[in-house]
Image (cartoon, rainbow, N blue to C red):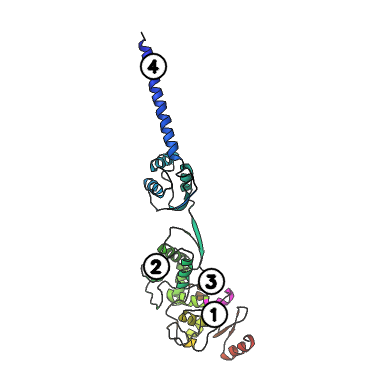
């Protein structure tokens, strides 16, 4: 007969065998679930919203076909210590990656990003067209938002303009965006950049000049359109201020171009008669608002113009300007520089 000791040892061996088989089975299942969802490489774009829980991320990845099992994702991310450090954003993941690689990518936060550049002087419709051409926005949605009063910034208070409410305030710069960002996100990003540039110190300077922020940016936008070189900007600004001071029409060609809605290589007499509040040949004072987005150099020129007696300027063939105090000097400059 077998002793009690033998029976206990046999029972223990059976328990250990069952435990070992169970562990092997679990490991096999975990290994199978942590393998890639596909053997064929396939890039899948996934956007993880800010504030997503690990559970929500797992469900999103499983529904998108990036991973096989959300349960395996939850188990492995917790085991690796990443369950609370996965980052939101737009990613391009591959369903042929194993679960470990996917979790690693999400923990690094290396999101898919796109760069775009808005040149200085671009007006709202040019910005919308450029972003739409690059596949970043819907043009009409962008323009609708650009004319809405939902944005709460100090420089947008009490704006009275004939054009888009945000004209002049979408700062021209190079931006980096994630693919999941929409029209509202991009506009806010550009307004935030403007707010960084046009800071409290510059707003205080506008008050010293007895100007509103809107008037400053309107002047800056004309300087931006008229000047190619930074050294000319404060001088062009001085001509604008000098003309405003004596009640002389600004007669700035760029405002006529804006009124026409097109850029012509040359303006004719009939163009200067276009019926628009932006036509500074027909109307005295400043136009209703900016005619484009000025860069920082033009904003500073509008706030810190040179002190001169100039009332005229003329663009030379190299893009620089010659400045004159009288009409006689201006006409002489025309004879000299315009062929």
Quarter occupied by residue 74: top left
Left or right: residue 309 versus residue 24 is: right
Kindly report which numbered mark, 1 or 2, lies closer to the viewer in this rendering.
Answer: 2
Helix, strand or loop at disc 1?
helix
Seen in the picture, residue 318 relative to 179 is either above or below; the reply is below
Q: Residue at x 43, y 42 (%)?
A: 77
Q: Nearer the viewer, mark 4 or mark 1?
A: 4
- First-in-chain label (1 vs 2): 2
Give whichever of 270, 279 is nearer the camera.
270
State the predominant SS element of the stretch in magenta. Answer: helix
Query: What's the CA distance linking mark 3 and mark 2?
Result: 30 Å
Mark 3 or mark 2, which has the lower sequence index?
Answer: 2
Label 3–label 2 contact, CB within 8 A: no
- The question of residue 232 being in magenta is answered with yes
Residue 5 percent location from the top left of the image: 37, 12
Residue 10 versus residue 80 in the image, above or below: above
Q: Is residue 27 above or below residue 148?
A: above
The alpha-carbon separation of the residues under discs 2 and 4 comes to 75 Å
Of badges 3 and 4, the one in the foreground is 4
Q: Residue at x 46, y 88 (%)?
A: 273
Q: Which residue is mark 1?
A: 236
Label 4: element kind: helix
Q: Which mark is residue 141?
A: 2
Residues packed near mark 2 inside 10 Å, few (<14), some (14 to 19) or many (20 plus): few
Magenta stretch? 225-236
């Amino acid at each position: 007969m077998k002793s009690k000791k033998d029976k206990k040892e046999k029972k223990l061996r059976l328990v250990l065998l069952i435990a070992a088989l169970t562990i092997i089975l679990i490991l096999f299942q975990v290994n199978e679930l942590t393998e890639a969802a596909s053997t064929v490489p396939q890039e899948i774009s996934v956007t993880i919203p800010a504030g997503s829980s690990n559970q929500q991320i797992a469900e999103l990845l499983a529904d998108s076909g990036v991973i096989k099992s959300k349960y395996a994702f939850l188990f492995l991310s917790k085991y690796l210590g990443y369950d609370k450090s996965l980052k939101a954003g737009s990613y391009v993941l591959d369903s042929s990656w194993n679960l470990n690689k996917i979790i690693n990518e999400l923990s690094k936060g290396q999101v898919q990003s796109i760069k775009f550049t808005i040149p200085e002087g671009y007006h709202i419709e040019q910005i919308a067209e450029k972003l739409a051409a690059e596949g970043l926005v819907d043009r009409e949605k962008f323009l609708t938002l650009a004319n809405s009063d939902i944005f709460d910034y100090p420089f947008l208070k009490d704006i009275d303009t004939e054009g888009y409410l945000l004209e002049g305030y979408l700062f021209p710069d190079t931006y980096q965006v994630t693919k999941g960002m929409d029209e509202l996100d991009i506009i806010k990003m550009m307004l935030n950049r403007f707010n960084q540039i046009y800071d409290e110190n510059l707003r205080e300077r506008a008050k010293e000049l007895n100007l509103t922020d809107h008037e400053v940016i309107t002047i800056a936008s004309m300087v931006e359109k008229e000047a190619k070189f930074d050294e000319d900007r404060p001088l062009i600004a001085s001509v604008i201020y000098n003309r405003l001071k004596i009640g002389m029409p600004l007669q700035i060609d760029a405002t006529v171009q804006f009124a026409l809605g097109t850029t012509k290589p040359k303006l004719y007499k009939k163009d200067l008669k276009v019926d628009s509040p932006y036509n500074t040949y027909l109307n005295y004072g400043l136009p209703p608002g900016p005619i484009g987005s000025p860069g920082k150099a033009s904003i500073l020129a509008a706030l810190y113009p040179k002190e001169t007696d100039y009332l005229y300027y003329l663009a030379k063939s190299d893009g620089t300007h010659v400045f004159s105090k009288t009409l006689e000097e201006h006409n002489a400059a025309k004879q000299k520089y315009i062929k």
